[in-house]
Amino acid sequence: MTYDRTYWRDEVFKRITEEELTKLILELCNIPSPYGFEKEAGDYVYNWMKHEGFAPRRVGLSEERFNVVGKLKGAGGGKSLLYSSHLDTAGPSGSSLDSWMYRDLENPFWHSAWLENGIFYGQGVENDKGPMACFLLAAKAIKEAGVPLLGDLYLTACPGEMGQEPVDEFSGLSYVSKETGAEYMMVHGGIMADYGVAAEGTDFGISWVEAGKAFFKITIQGKGIYTPVIRHTTQLNEHLNPIVKAAALIPNLTKWAMEYEEKYTRVYRGGTIIPKVQIGAIKGGHPHFIIGGSDTCTLYLDCRILPGMVPAEVAEQLRSVVVDSGVEAEVELFLFRQGYEADFRQVTPFVDIIKESHQGVFANELKMSAPVFSSMWRDHSVFNEYGVPSVTYGPSRQTPSLVELMRCAQSYASIALDVCMQSRG
């Protein structure tokens, strides 16, 4: 069969309309889906796929948190493509702990989406249901145009990507991330794709490498002292109160984090990784019983790592920082996820397809994405782990325009045509 690229591209593009894309984005992104509470948005995507004839399945650990897997089936003998975005969004979840993290709990940005002067606003649009709507509409246009695909086109929506992880008393399914999302889908979803795209914001750059991450607890030992009898010292590392001791450790951890970032920055073929470190949380004492102080204070660190790097290397450096600070503390790893880079030989033909599609839609050259995007964790790391050469490629990370998302949908459609009309032979 001869594939007339220009003809089918034109037929598909004219079926991607601003009106339909806007409707899909606003309906989907006005369904709140903070991490752990993705069900309603997942049900919407499932019902949309069912209505449009993509034979969706719910694939998940529970009825509340599931992946939606749909497929536009090809005739056979062609290469297959996986599109994926995540359902969960950042921001307040309605928990009593929200007030510990956010000052703007009622900000509409967290809970809703809207189009104003040609620009979309809302966390759900930016991360990550806007790009999801783009590939869903692209697939619908391909189906309506009657394109005689050879390979299958997989459409997936995943929970659990935002990065919450069980630790201490915060345990249970609602805190689990990758194991209920893309990781679970790749094991149980029956997906046989040749290539994958994590449809997320990259300012239309591309990358196929992603940092890993190691989460550590540093538990500082001290002694809870009744306030009327406490004795202070300006030598913070010698103070009995472990919360005060933490003040001696934090500056050294910050200095180490800056040195770590500089030491481990790497340029890969698939992008540049600048591995950062952050003290993301601190726990010590009870707000309702401050008169007795606390015996322990715990710092929680998010340390990004290079592909192939082992957490023990980071842990040893953290222990040295603790010792040099003169603080008694224990360093403990509680989460490790390896980073991955797609095999260059396997991913290169796919990248060439994306370059050509991007050029056809934007009339400019596809560039590598900024290091911040390849220094995150995104689900294409899971796909590369399972041997599906995958990239991250998508629209602006912040406040994308309707024009931009229209082009995104067109680009996703063009990529799907070029992959799924490609014979395995």
Image (tube, rainbow, N blue to C red):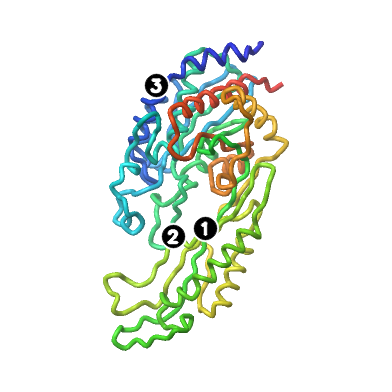
Picture mark count = 3
Q: Is residue 30 above or below residue 266?
A: above
Q: Position of residue 352 (x, y in %)?
A: 67, 29
Q: Quadrant of the C terminus?
A: top right
Q: CA distance from mark 2 to mark 3?
A: 42 Å
- Point out which mark residue 20 bears: 3
Name the one closer to the observer, 227 or 360.
Answer: 360
Q: Position of residue 37 (x, y in %)?
A: 36, 44
Q: Mark number for residue 28?
A: none
Mark linked to residue 167: 2
State if disc 2 and disc 1 touch (CB < 8 Å).
yes
Q: Is residue 273 above or below residue 193?
A: below
Residue nearer the viewer, 302 or 192: 302
Label 1 and label 3: CA atoms lie apart by 41 Å
Q: Earlier in the sequence, mark 2 or mark 3?
A: 3
| Gap between marks 1 and 2 measured at Cα | 9 Å
Q: Which element carries disc 2, helix, strand or loop?
A: loop
Does 141 sit left or right of 290 as displayed? right
Q: Position of residue 359 (x, y in %)?
A: 62, 25
Name which residue lies at 65% across and 30% down: 350
Earlier residue among tags 1 and 3: 3
Q: What's the residue type where badge 3 is placed? A: Glu
Mark 1 burial class by Cα count in 10 Å: few <14, some 14-19, many 20+: some
In what element is the residue under mark 1? Answer: strand
User: Is the residue 153 above or below the residue 375 in the image?
Assistant: above
Which residue, given by chain and number where applicable, does mark 1 sit on? 335
Q: Secondary structure at mark 3?
A: helix
